Image (cartoon, rainbow, N blue to C red):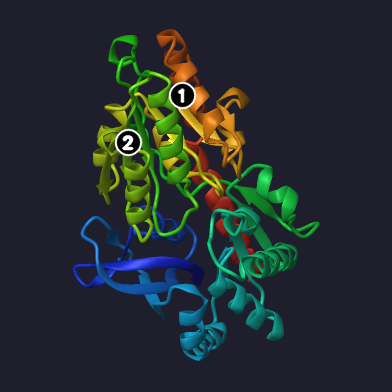
């Protein structure tokens, strides 16, 4: 049977073919083929070449492009074309998996409801945080936030099979339909080569000029790089000469760069832009003394889990599934850069504490090894197949 997975994902091009950093053939698409005969990925395709992204299509995997748009106004301009594409897809003899929240899967779920079509969902984020204050700057933010929360609750209650990336967080706010199968796993592929054998050793830490790393897109304010830059400023003012590595790119990079200059910390920050995933990212993490994720919204954060697998100290904000991964003493409220600065400073007062943090990170990351996730993932796909 064919599976059609529909999402809001931003896909770019690599050598003229649809490509993605996270939703590519190897890390995402081919796993559907453990149960389904064919897969079609539906998402926004942007006419941008990105050599660091990897191909989406491959054996038995095709791609259906949604016209590129960013923001409500551009969506309105392309809305009739988008609805036409989704309505035609709804006529297919296939299993439908909606990756929510998102505008495109929301439209499809409404079409499916009108046509009495079944669908399954993968719930990967919370619009309450995604469209929360500070995450998005738009005059209609509150209206969008209310609408997306309502439709996500309906989608989770309407779906024949549900999957959440968290164990509890998303399920509490968007519960599944009673009596219907539901699963929890991450799409992140953590294999043996992603893990260090042991946490970062005492000798590897630089407590005089510690290096903090963050990995996150800059297409919105979701990842909170501004909060981290402000915390860096506080650390420096209080005598800790922290260096910061920011991995990622997007429309807000220029703002983050200007903020660094405004706070006079630009010399302590290196903007790397896009970096190909895998060994290149792991090497940068290994060279760092701490990973910080000050996000305003998350499902179960891939970048944090990849850093945890490298056995370095990790700190994160109190959103989404982050509290499911980190101890409470390494959690702070998403806008609270002062508490974040205190956590960073206090952590670097004791090397043994840093190694203990790294050990906890590594042990927790092992729970999410691919061999554990693939079993649950396959059970989910089989439940979707049974739905049809």
Above or below for 324 versus 25:
above
Q: Residues within 10 Å of mark 2 (few under 14, many from 20)?
A: some
Q: Is residue 264 left or right of residue 381?
A: left
Which sits earlier in the primary sequence, circle 1 or circle 2? Answer: 2
User: Which image quarter: residue 42?
Assistant: bottom left
In front: 25, or 84? 84
In front: 32, or 197? 197
Q: Is residue 43 left or right of residue 94?
A: left
- Residue at 28% across, 58% down: 53
- Residue at 60% across, 43% down: 319
Residue 62 seen from this side: yes
Q: Which residue is mark 1?
A: 344
In front: 217, or 160? 217
Label of residue 132 in the image? none
Q: Residue 49, how many percent across, how many down?
A: 23, 67
User: Which image quarter: residue 94?
Assistant: bottom right
In the rendered image, the quadrant that contains the C terminus is bottom right
Determine the secondary structure under disc 1.
helix
- Residue at 46% across, 33% down: 231
Q: Residue 136, how many percent across, how many down?
A: 53, 60
Q: Residue 222, how many percent across, how many down?
A: 50, 52
Q: Residues within 10 Å of mark 1 (few under 14, many from 20)?
A: many
Q: Which residue is mark 2?
A: 265
Q: Residue 262, how many percent across, how many down?
A: 36, 44
- Residue at 56% across, 87% down: 87
In front: 97, or 144? 144
Above or below for 231 versus 377:
above
Determine the secondary structure under disc 2.
loop
Residue 1 seen from this side: no
Above or below for 386 versus 308:
below
């Amino acid at each position: 049977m064919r599976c059609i997975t529909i999402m809001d994902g931003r896909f770019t091009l690599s050598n003229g073919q649809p490509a993605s950093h996270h939703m590519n053939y190897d890390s995402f698409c081919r796993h559907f083929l453990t149960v389904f005969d064919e897969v079609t990925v539906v998402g926004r395709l942007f006419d941008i070449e990105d050599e660091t992204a990897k191909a989406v299509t491959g054996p038995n995997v095709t791609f259906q492009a949604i016209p590129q748009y960013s923001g409500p106004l551009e969506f309105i301009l392309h809305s009739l074309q988008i609805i036409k594409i989704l309505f035609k897809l709804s006529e297919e003899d296939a299993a439908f998996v909606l990756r929510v929240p998102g505008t495109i899967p929301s439209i499809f779920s409404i079409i499916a409801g009108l046509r009495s079509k079944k669908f399954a969902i993968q719930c990967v984020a919370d619009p309450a945080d995604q469209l929360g204050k500070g995450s998005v700057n738009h005059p209609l933010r509150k209206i969008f936030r209310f609408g997306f929360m309502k439709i996500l609750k309906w989608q989770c209650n309407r779906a024949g099979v549900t999957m959440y990336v968290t164990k509890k967080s998303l399920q509490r706010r968007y519960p599944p339909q009673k009596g219907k199968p539901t699963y929890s796993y991450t799409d992140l592929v953590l294999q043996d080569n992603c893990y260090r054998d042991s946490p970062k050793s005492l000798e590897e830490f630089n407590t005089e000029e510690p290096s903090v790393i963050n990995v996150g897109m800059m297409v919105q304010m979701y990842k909170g790089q501004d909060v981290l830059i402000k915390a860096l400023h506080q650390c420096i003012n209080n005598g800790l000469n922290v260096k910061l590595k920011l991995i990622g790119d997007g429309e807000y990079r220029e703002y983050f760069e200007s903020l660094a200059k405004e706070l006079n910390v630009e010399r302590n920050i290196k903007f790397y832009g896009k970096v190909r995933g895998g060994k290149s990212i792991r090497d940068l993490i290994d060279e760092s003394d701490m990973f910080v994720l000050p996000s305003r919204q998350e499902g179960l954060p891939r970048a944090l889990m990849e850093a945890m697998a490298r056995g370095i100290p990790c700190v994160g904000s109190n959103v989404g599934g982050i509290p499911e991964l980190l101890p409470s003493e390494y959690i702070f409220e998403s806008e609270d850069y002062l508490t974040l600065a205190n956590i960073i400073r206090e952590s670097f007062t004791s090397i043994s504490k840093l190694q203990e943090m790294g050990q906890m990170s590594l042990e927790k990351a092992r729970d999410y090894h691919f061999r554990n996730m693939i079993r649950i993932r396959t059970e989910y796909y089989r439940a979707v197949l049974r739905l049809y």
